[in-house]
Image (spheres, helix red, strand yellow):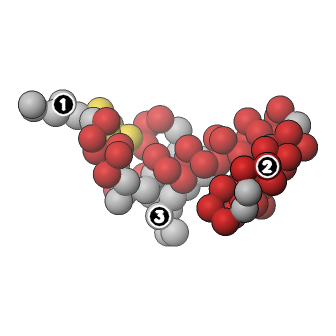
Amino acid sequence: MNKNLQEIIKLYSVGSSQELQSFLNSLSKPTLMSTLIDFLTIYFNDKNSSKLYIAGYEPIEEKLGYNGYKLTVGARGLKRIRIKT
């Protein structure tokens, strides 16, 4: 996992909001973008993410890597489904 992402998660969960804000402010824009993309890649390829099912996405299992996610998988790693309400 991305070291910056680990630190952000740690500060968000057990640190103060001031510490988190200070850490985020210390990162460059490209680093923040890379960290966000890493987070979204992990989240979107998490087959247990109920939030994505609610949003109408279903994982395509054969796109997942040995550890549950693959950083090289793009939007084709998900398929949109209709939710009947």
Amino acid type of the residue tagged 1 in the rendering: Arg
Foreground of the two, 81 or 52: 52
Estimate the spatial distance between the alpha carbons at disc 2 and disc 3, rounded to whole Å.
33 Å
Which residue is disc 2 drawn over?
Answer: 18
Q: Residue visible at 72% across and 50% down?
A: 17
Q: Spot the residue most to the left.
A: 85
- Label 2 or label 1, whichever lies nearer to me, is 2
CA neighbours of label 2 inside 10 A, class few (<14), some (14 to 19), many (20+): few
6 versus 39 height, above or below? below
Do callouts 2 and 1 mark residues in contact (Cβ within 8 Å)? Answer: no
Of badges 2 and 3, the one in the foreground is: 2
Residue type, mark 3 in image: Gly
Q: Residue visible at 66% across and 41% down?
A: 36
Quadrant housing residue 32: top right
- Could you tell me if residue 6 is visible in this image? no
Give the labeled residue for mark 1.
82
Helix, strand or loop at mark 2:
helix
Measured as percent of width and height from the top left, residue 75 is found at 47, 35
Q: Which residue is mark 3?
A: 68
Left or right of 85, for residue 77? right
What's the residue type where badge 2 is placed? Answer: Gln
Determine contact: label 2, label 3, CB under 8 Å: no
